[in-house]
Image (cartoon, grey):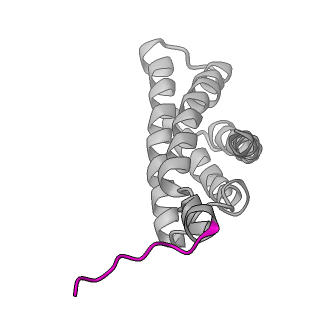
Amino acid sequence: MPRLARELAKFGTVGGVAYIVQLAATNLFWLVLDAAPLVGQALGVLIATVVAFLGNRFWTFSHRARTGLAREYLLFFVFNAIGLGIQLATLGVSVYVLGFDGTLARNVAGNVVGVGLGSLFRFASYKRWVFPAQPEERPAERLGGAEGAAPERQSEPY
């Protein structure tokens, strides 16, 4: 359990930094560049995703198996695209279905509720598929067989 707690703490720290980057970028696109709600959200998330990948690969899950940068990067972005879909869905429902289109409403829907739901999905996905656990040896193999004895060999038929 301590390893899970460490991973969650590191994931939260990396996520916090990426979240600040996303908030700043998204609001910049909305307020300064007058981007549409979903476009600004998507661009902010894209920028934050690069930050999150680097932090998670080289810090949060650095102790896990290395399965290749290209593979990890591709899966990371696929799962982030799904997480982005979760964020955009919450924002879209808020703006286009419920009619809550102010800056505060956009931030609550996309950057609080959407990020929260998307983060739960992302953590589980990264841990399971992007940065899988190292294959572990069985205790008997590590000790050279039962009780430290040499491993049993199967005799060949004569």
Viewer-side residue, 94 vs 135: 135
**Which residue extends farthest bottom?**
158
Question: Is residue 40 visible from the viewing direction of this image?
Answer: no
- Position of the N terminus by quadrant: top right
Q: Is residue 92 left or right of residue 3?
A: left
Q: Using the rendered image of the protein, determine whether residue 68 is visible from the camera's viewpoint.
A: yes
Magenta part of the protein: which range?
148-158
Residue 10: horizontal and vertical position, in percent?
75, 46
Is 125 located above or below residue 115 in the figure?
below
- Give above or below for 95 relative to 138: above
Residue visible at 47% across and 11% down?
98
Horizontal arrangement in the rendering, residue 21 relative to residue 93 (left or right): right
Residue 76's x, y, as percent? 51, 55
Q: Residue at x 65, y 50 (%)?
A: 48
Near-viewer residue (40 or 79): 79
Q: What predominant SS class does the magenta segment belong to?
A: loop
Q: In which quadrant is the C terminus drawn?
A: bottom left
Q: Is residue 132 left or right of residue 10?
A: left
